[in-house]
Image (spheres, grey):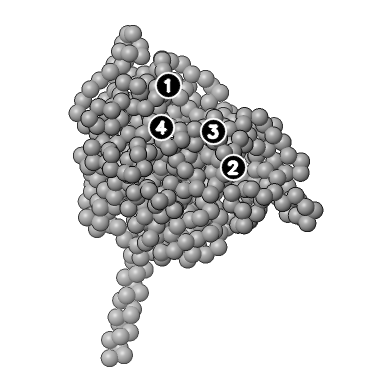
Amino acid sequence: VMALMCVIALFALITAQCARATPPNFVLLFADDLGYGDLGCFGHPSSLTPNLDRLAAHGLRFTDFYVTSPVCSPSRAALLTGRYQTRSGIYPGVLYPASKGGLPLNETTIAEVLKSKGYTTAIVGKWHLGVGLNDTYLPTRQGFDNYLGIPYSHDQGPCQNLTCFPPDVKCYGFCDQGVVTVPLMFNENIKQQPADFLQLEKAYTYSEFATQFITDAVRNNRPFFLYYPSHHTHYPQYAGADYAGKSPRGPFGDALMEFDGTVGKILQTLEETGVINNTLVFFTGDNGPELMRKSRGGNAGLMKCGKGTTYEGGMREPAIAYWPGSIQPGVTRALASSLDILPSFAKLAGAALPDVQLDGVDMTNILLNHGASERQTIFYYPIAPSEKYSVFAVRWKNFKAHYYTQGAIHSENPQDSNCSSLFLKRYDPPLLYNLEADPSENYNLNSTEWDSVLKQIQAVKEQFEASMVFGESEIAKGRDSALEPCCIPNCTPKPTCCRCTSAL
């Protein structure tokens, strides 16, 4: 009997080692303009997010997870490269349809890191890291085998005549004017212009893309990386017939519910193809909520202000890691960043790291052991960093020091003028908050007993800024309207002639 038990134990050990030796698949879910307090699992009383709540209940929920910028393009650049956006040149602000620049091709993305180990890769949704001349900066040039999506924000084109909710409720607002309507692209070809918002999520999941991508990868015995940067919950909100009018939270809640539904379809596909237990699903968002939209915008919960600011509400995001059998359910207060996703995925896949200065650290000890973080600091860059006005704030352990603050139109809030005041304020000594005791940044620690903490933070800041080499600004290269994606090249009059309709 003892011999039999030993054999069984040895078999179980070998089986577990073989399972771990199989490269895991990765699904990276990235919401848009979602606040710290927007999900049901993060405390919102009327958000219906059952699939994300399921991930949180059976996975690891982060309380102290950060992105690198309070706006879209720079945050996405840092996520995919593991490097602050200042190194890659994705500053100041965001890229536009006519932008000449984009994420430099010599930057190494997560997709390129994983392809070196035989992964098949795909992105579905919002790219927002450039299009450029002859599609220079599209995802297919940055390590992704397949792409279906809108290459920038879906408000970066006229939307007042587009339908955002069935049967024919027009989008709320006007979005950007004088440019082409937003295109839906498949790899490097425009499939539809303007994109049909009501059918978009179905195209992303059911009929053409995410489901088929995962199914094909499993059939071909290939490890895969699926990146789903959603358009939800960015303005203007939209939702198809399955979700419109279904949330008690109104249009924002419907859009959030549709995003959650897409997450659910992806999880269902992972289960049906038998790879759910060998797939790490990681969820977070690009930046804080757009408070200026009021009830049509997101909610930062306890956090101060929102999108466009370096207060907590602008850069502290909900985050969840889910991997059945490998990540034990729970909550972690370990400090982590979107920068850490690339080195962590690389470690789990057995891939070499890019031979460049990385700002991310390996967080597999947090994920697999609920252990301590290798990270002690977070550096908060504003929308428009420069070598003169570089890091606005630093978090070191539990403490955060503000050297500068500046509000943003995105965060207009009648309850707190600091959120929208565009006046740049400098602090000497810096404002200091203990984020464990005061996550809302209400109570400045201004007594001399905190001088040693400020000195430590100042030393960390100086060391970091001395190591930062600003890349050439891609956004400062300007715009050329001829670069705006058009499904009928060289048509006139542009932009109104750029219209192509096809079924999704």
| Residue at image mark 1 | 176
Neighbourhood count class around disc 2 (C-alpha, 10 Å): few under 14, some 14–19, many 20 upward: many
- Marks 2 and 3 close (CB-CB < 8 Å): no
- Quadrant where the C terminus is found in the figure: top left
Q: Earlier in the sequence, mark 3 or mark 4?
A: 4
Q: Earlier in the sequence, mark 4 or mark 2?
A: 4
Q: Give the residue furthest to the top.
A: 493
- Marks 3 and 4 close (CB-CB < 8 Å): no
Q: Earlier in the sequence, mark 1 or mark 2?
A: 1
Q: Where's residue 149, x and y in %?
A: 33, 33
Q: Where's residue 460, x and y in %?
A: 69, 49
Q: Is residue 502 visible?
A: yes
The residues bearing labels 1 and 2 have C-alpha atoms spaced at a distance of 27 Å
Q: What kind of element bears circle 1?
A: loop
Q: Which residue is pictured at 73% across the width and 39% down the height?
A: 427
- Marks 4 and 2 close (CB-CB < 8 Å): no
Neighbourhood count class around disc 1 (C-alpha, 10 Å): few under 14, some 14–19, many 20 upward: some
Residue nearer the viewer, 277 or 289: 289
| Residue at image mark 2 | 311
The residues bearing labels 2 and 3 have C-alpha atoms spaced at a distance of 13 Å
Closest to the camera, between mark 3 and mark 4, is: 3
Q: What kind of element bears circle 4?
A: loop
Q: Earlier in the sequence, mark 1 or mark 4?
A: 1
The kind of residue on which mark 4 rests is: Tyr
Number of numbered tags placed on the structure image: 4
Q: Which residue is pictured at 57% across the width and 39% down the height?
A: 415
